[in-house]
Every structure is written in structure tokens, then in C-alpha cells.
Image (tube, grey):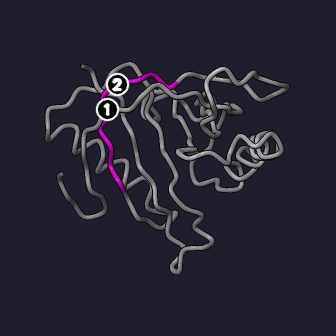
Amino acid sequence: MAMTTLGAFTVTRFPKRTLAFVGHTGPYMNNPALFEELFSKVLAWAAPKGLLEGPGVESISIYHDDPEKVPPAKQRISVGFTVPAGTPAEGEIRMMEIPAGHYAVGSFEIFPDQYGAAWEEMMGFLMDENLSPAAGPMYESYKNDPRRHPEGKHLVDICVALRD
């Protein structure tokens, strides 16, 4: 496991997972209210169905576009929770498969304004270790409710699919 200023890094294999999500196209950086709105939509749909009570449920934001190559107005994100395979989509809630495979994982305990720096460290780890991202997802997996952290920090894993 490598360690840097903000995070600790590993490479691990994840199983296939199903994400119940809502999508957004447009600017999202430095907009916590947008993420709260999107997560709230999925939460309001999933919680009454008991989909968030099992072990291993993850809260995830997938980033589909490279912010250095795609203008903010066209950047796409998908925000939601992992649910059991076979869960049907309903209304604006859609389903997506997060493929099984090897992922580089950076684990961070950061303040909200440190996400950019955490992503920079993640990309630096990939370069330093000669790891090649796959065409698969790059996402954040949130591990806590920062409102309950004594310093308001976010515990987050940044995950990047790797070529096998």
C-alpha cells in the first residue's frame, strides 16, 4: 500500500455491482447541493423498498467524462447506491452495472475542498505505478456522513478501473 499526503493507495479486485442512479449533465464541481439533491432522489426511492439495509451497500458518484477534455456543460455524472442485481428501474431511477475487475483505490479523509487534490494524487499514483486506466468507470465511493464526522471530513475511496 502506497501512502501520500492525503491518501493511501491499493489495487484490488471488485465483483460486479448494480447501481441504482440518477444522472446529471452539466457543471457539478464544487456544488455539494447538486450531489445532495441527486442522492436524495435515489434515497427517497430506495429506502422505502429496503434496498439500502443490506451489508455492502455503497454510495457512489460515477464520473463519465474527463473534465480536462469535456466542457463543464457536457460533463456527465451518475449518482446513487448499489442495489441487488435484478432490481428493476423505475421512473427517473435507472440501473447500471459496474463491471467486475481490478481497480486502483485511493482512500482519503478530506475536507470538501480537497476533492480536486485527492483526484490529482490518485492520478499521480496511477502514473507512478505504471497503471493503465481501463475504459471502465472512475468513481467515488463515500464511506461516511460528513455531518457526523467530528471535523466534517469526508471518508471517500476514489476508484479507477484498470486494464487487466
**C-alpha gap between disc 1 and disc 2:** 5 Å
Earlier along the polypeptide chain: callout 1 or callout 2? 1
Question: Percent x, y for residue 90?
Answer: 82, 24
Q: Main secondary structure of the magenta part?
A: strand
Question: Percent x, y for residue 41?
Answer: 79, 43
Question: Percent x, y for residue 139?
Answer: 47, 38
Discs 1, 2 touching: Cβ within 8 Å: yes
Give left or right: position of 153 versus 105.
right
Residue at point 30% right, 46% down? 122
Q: Residue furthest left?
A: 129
Give left or right: position of 24 versus 149.
right
Q: Magenta residues?
A: 98-107
What crowding class fits label 2: few (fewer than 14 Cα within 10 Å), some (14-19), or many (20 or more)?
some
Q: Residue furthest front?
A: 54
Element at badge 2?
strand
Which quadrant would the C terminus be assigned to in this image?
top left
Residue at point 39% right, 40% down? 159
Q: Quadrant of residue 118?
A: bottom left
Element at badge 1?
strand
Q: Amino acid at mark 2?
A: Gly
Question: Percent x, y for residue 105?
Answer: 33, 43
Q: Which residue is mark 2?
A: 101
Residue at point 50% right, 26% down? 98
Q: Which residue is mark 1?
A: 13
Judging depth in this view, the residue of 100 and 3 nearest the camera is 100
